[in-house]
Image (cartoon, helix red, strand yellow):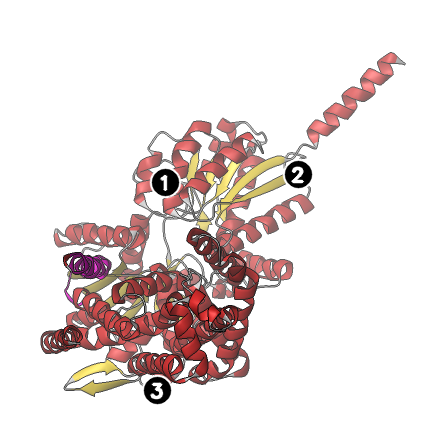
Amino acid sequence: MKKLLVFLSLIFVLSAFAQKPIKIGAILPLSDITGRQAANAMKLAVKEINDAGGILGRPVELIIVDDEMKPEKGAAAVDKLATVDKVDFFVGGMSSGVHLAQIPILKKYKKITVWIGAASYKCEEAIGADADWYFHLHPWDYLQGESYAIGWKAIVERYPQVKIEKIFLAYEEGAFGTASFKSYLDEFELAKQGTGVWAGLMKDLKGAPFKSAALGGGDYRAMLLQAKQYDPDLFIWAGYDADAVPMLTQAKEIGFAPKLFVGAPPGWPADFGKNPLSHGVVLYGMWAPALKDVSPIARHFWDAYIKEFNEEPATYFAPLGYTNIYFLVEAIKKAGTLEDKAIIKALREIEYESPVGGILKISPSRIIKNQGFRAQKILQWQNGTQHVIWPFEYATAQLIYPFPGWSGR
Amino acid sequence: MKKIMNLYILFFLMLFLVALFRPYAFFYGLQRGSLYSLVALPLALILGIVGLLNLAHGDLLTLGLYLGYILFNQLRFDPIFSVIVIAPILFIIGFVVYKLTIERVLKSHHLNLLLITFGVSITLVEFINLLWTSRPRNVYVPYATKSINIFGINVGAYEFLYIAASIGVLLLIVFILKKTRFGQAAFAVGQNPKGAAIVGINVKLVYTITFSLATAMIAIAASLMIPRVSIFPHLGGPFTMRSFCLTAMAGLGNLPGIVLSGITLGLAEAIVQSIPGYSGWSDLVFFGVLILVIALKGYRRAVR
């Protein structure tokens, strides 16, 4: 009887252990649409994985902590997930500023981290070359800059009427904007020497800062007048979603219509496509809803997200959040164990077709060994829809060139 | 009187010089500065009569903008005319906010008053965030992007409404304070609440109506701003700060001074923004001018 009791207890303990969930700790800014939709997409991925039987015979548990877009909260969230929730992996991310504060804490725990946010090269410098456990999926700012050049070169080849020699960069005066301008300046210096990705394309560059509406600004007219005087082939602004419509409104007001009007905010305002001024605006992005028409996985994600949350994914952080979980889970499946070394090896080997559009595969960047996506896409608002213009294999429309101007709208 | 005249002469001389050397900055500064004044006037009214610095002022403006957005989006209500609907709603909201929160701590320490309006501000922002998310909203009406040519300079026409509206609101407040029974009572309460109570003025009622009325006046700025700004939960914060700066610069109870201060700071900001490579200094100049004016005022008072 005693032996039977011991045997039954052992079975009970073992089965309980076998069912113990694999814990993934996510840190996201939940009051922002990027973080909220990324969190939703992660929940969707976890639900699909658990419905399909989990991984290694165990369910997946997702614990999400709000960083409130504040560095101190983001850093405390890492500590909380590691010590209170005892998670196995870290995922998530959005702001570079928050991530800079998290990096020293992440280094303390050295848990496998698969990060979808933080584009600033400063984060890469802070992580350093030795962090084998750190995987960064979002392209770094300089990789984005390089990919735009590659994209524009391809576009110039396909559309001979397109000329991109004089570039005007309007950048918000905070860390995001100034980092963008610095990377453009570096590339311009290389282009002048005939090297770098912009060589043969960019002949002249001018920049002007502006105070973003998101930070109490919103008057761009002085900057737009400078741009109008310069008469660029490509006008690009690096700011936030709150700048998008007032920038166009004021450009129309002063009659500034460059041949290419490009916006590079992390997200776009609600119903931006419905605004008549949006037609013809080019943007950089990792993803566009129109991708669902050319990619089955993007279609699956789109339909599943709407079914689950009764809203459309509106930011690329939604498919990126979904990718975040699946990429990690696919690697755990391939490794067949929760041992760090095996999972790191698997993460470096797997190729995952992402709803973001494209195959996700790890390769080294300037400093870190484990960089995921390297390129953004060139998109264009056309009659209310974001269309993919480049890469051509995912193109959903032809480029409208030159920018249609303001008359009649 | 002579000092005030000198001040006005100095002000118009400054306008003339800016218009001569930086015509774009002149128009942009005039427009932007008038907007700052338009938003600041109701805050100054509350500060002058109730003695309360309302830190939720900008957030009430944000709420007004969202109301205008809904009216346009759901009922195709023209933004400018939406003031007819927004003003009464903001009056009621102002009334409720005052009765539920501010009135209860009115007699306590000034710090408590500040804290309660700070609490109202946070509550409003979070409430707006919950209802409409952080994603910016916009309203597009073609007439808000039209421009006119003045002496060969292409300037947006719509924002000239800010100038007219700020002068209009100033005149409206002065009219209420000088020519109506309520205004005269409010003026007396602002000067000496205890004395006003002794002569039979219902101070509590005056405070309530003043706060609600000033909140309703925010609707004028909100309805004009709707087609020109991105509407998002944190939009109002910087407007509270600027309104407070204008009130501090003009001095308590100096309503025309709010308009002059607004235009002066707007021009200073626009001039700096018009200098290539130095636009990032505009905040520094804004607050620099403010500090300078307050310091000069303090110095003159000390000399006297």
Please state the horizontal and vertical placement of residue A113, each as a whole percent of the image. Answer: 47, 36
Determine which of the numbered discs, if any, sits on residue B156 in the image.
none
Q: Amino acid at mark 1?
A: Leu
Query: Residue A147 sits in which quadrant?
Result: bottom left
Query: Residue B96 sits in which quadrant?
Result: bottom right
Q: Are marks 2 and 1 in contact (CB under 8 Å)?
A: no
Q: Amino acid at mark 2?
A: Pro
Determine which of the numbered discs, if any, sits on residue A59 in the image.
2
Tell me which segment is drawn in magenta: B274-302
Left or right, A242 with respect to B74, comes to: left
Please state the horizontal and vertical placement of residue B183, each as a whole percent of the image. Answer: 42, 79
Determine which of the numbered discs, if any, sits on residue A100 in the image.
1
Q: Residues within 10 Å of mark 3 (few under 14, many from 20)?
A: few
Q: Residues within 10 Å of mark 1 (few under 14, many from 20)?
A: many
First of labels 3, 1 by sequence position: 1
Q: Quadrant of the C terminus of chain A?
A: bottom left
Q: Is residue A367 above or below residue B16?
A: above
Residue drawn at 40 percent across, 73 percent down = B188
Determine which of the numbered discs, if any, sits on residue A408 in the image.
3
Q: Of the residues tagged 2 and 1, which is closer to the observer?
A: 1
Near-viewer residue (A409 or A172): A172
- Chain where mark 1 sits: A
Near-viewer residue (A234 or A70): A70
Query: What secondary structure is found at the residue carrying circle 1?
Result: helix
Furthest residue in direction front, as rendered: B198
Query: What secondary structure is found at the residue carrying circle 3?
Result: loop
Residue drawn at 49 percent across, 78 percent down = B86
User: In the rendered structure, does residue B285 fall within the stretch colored magenta?
Assistant: yes
Please state the horizontal and vertical placement of residue B206, each as a whole percent of the image. Answer: 48, 72
User: In the rendered structure, does residue B23 fall within the stretch colored magenta?
Assistant: no
